[in-house]
Amino acid sequence: MSELNPCAESTDDCTAADTCEACGGSLQTVDGEKVCSECGLVDTVDQLDRGPEWRRSESETNVRRTGAPVDRSRHDNGLTTRIGFGPDSDVSGPNARQLVRMRRLHNRARFASKAERNKAYGFTEIRRIVSALSLPTTVKDQSCSLFDSAQTENLLCGRSIEGFSAGAVYAACRVQSIARTIEEVVTVARADRDELLVAYDALNQELGLPVGPISPLEYLPRYATALGLDSECEARAREYAKAFVESESLGGKNPSGVAAACLYVAASEQGVDVRQADAADVADVSRMTIHSRISELKQLRYSNN
């Protein structure tokens, strides 16, 4: 019992403030919270907001707040005043009609031009796609920058806004070497595959994006989790993928299919039951593609031996 409750034998070292009221266990401070090590009861919570302090200047005498930081994913950078519907706007009496009129006029004057309205719609679509794919904030900001640059270069003429939003997200993933296939983006986007490809080609050619081929290694963690494989299979598949890349035989081949084939071979050697059809479904390629990559991988291993 002394190991479970360090305060049981020495009451001099442990005060009542360090003892759980529910079970008598010791309290430990974790991320600003005092938590009981025995029952998990949260005793106290640090209520201080340790986030950034947005002030007007560095002067200690001027404590005026400036609001939230600039948001690149907003068409107005998040700096426009908004007349909302919160508890502060609940006005009754003669001022209620005036507030409703102000809110209506404010909504009409939010966009100075049709281009700004299209930008706001495109940025909203980008934020939705990024959230659906669980992509980092850097992808969202760069996608909005690409969409803004495309609109400045008049690339949106005759093309859909939804397609350029999806194409900007896919282009940002390619630039940052984040493994996301076209099919994954199309699944959550409001544009089809053709619209995305047209937008991506325009962005790549006109803006000169520094994109390169995605390594099959980027797909391995997600595909291994989807197939229910352990870390040992993933590690062996990583070795096969590295050998495939170093052999310079990746040109013209889908890296997603290469990653799935490496996982299939590694799972087969470990005695794990994985079908080629399951690997093809995870990588969103055909079963023949998986079969061809498996044959090439076996030939590569045979030539190295």
Image (cartoon, helix red, strand yellow):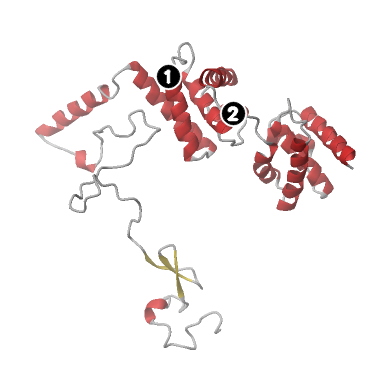
Q: State the separation of the CA atoms marked 2 and 1.
A: 20 Å
Mark seen at residue 151: 1
Residue at 54 percent of width and 22 percent of height: 208
Find numbered disc 2 in the image and state the secondary structure of the residue it sits on. Answer: loop
Nearer-the-camera pick, 157 or 175: 175
What residue type is disc 2 on?
Val
Q: Quick check: can you spot residue 261?
A: no
Say which quadrant the N terminus sits in. bottom right
Q: Quick check: can you spot residue 167?
A: yes
Q: Is residue 148 above or below residue 32?
A: above
**Mark 1 residue crowding within 10 angstroms, few (<14) / some (14–19) / many (20+):** some
| Image-quadrant location for residue 118 | top left
Residue at 23 percent of width and 43 percent of height: 87
Say which quadrant the C terminus sits in. top right
Which residue matches tag 2?
211
| Percent position of residue 203, x then y | 52, 21
| Image-quadrant location for residue 299 | top right
| Percent position of residue 233, x then y | 75, 49
| Image-quadrant location for residue 281 | top right
Left or right: 157 with respect to 238? left
What residue type is disc 1 on?
Gln
Q: Residue furthest left?
A: 94
Left or right: 117 with respect to 89? right
Nearer-the-camera pick, 180 or 303: 303
| Percent position of residue 241, x then y | 75, 40
Q: Is residue 45 above or below residue 242?
A: below
Find numbered disc 1 in the image and state the secondary structure of the residue it sits on. Answer: helix
First in residue order: circle 2 vs circle 1: 1
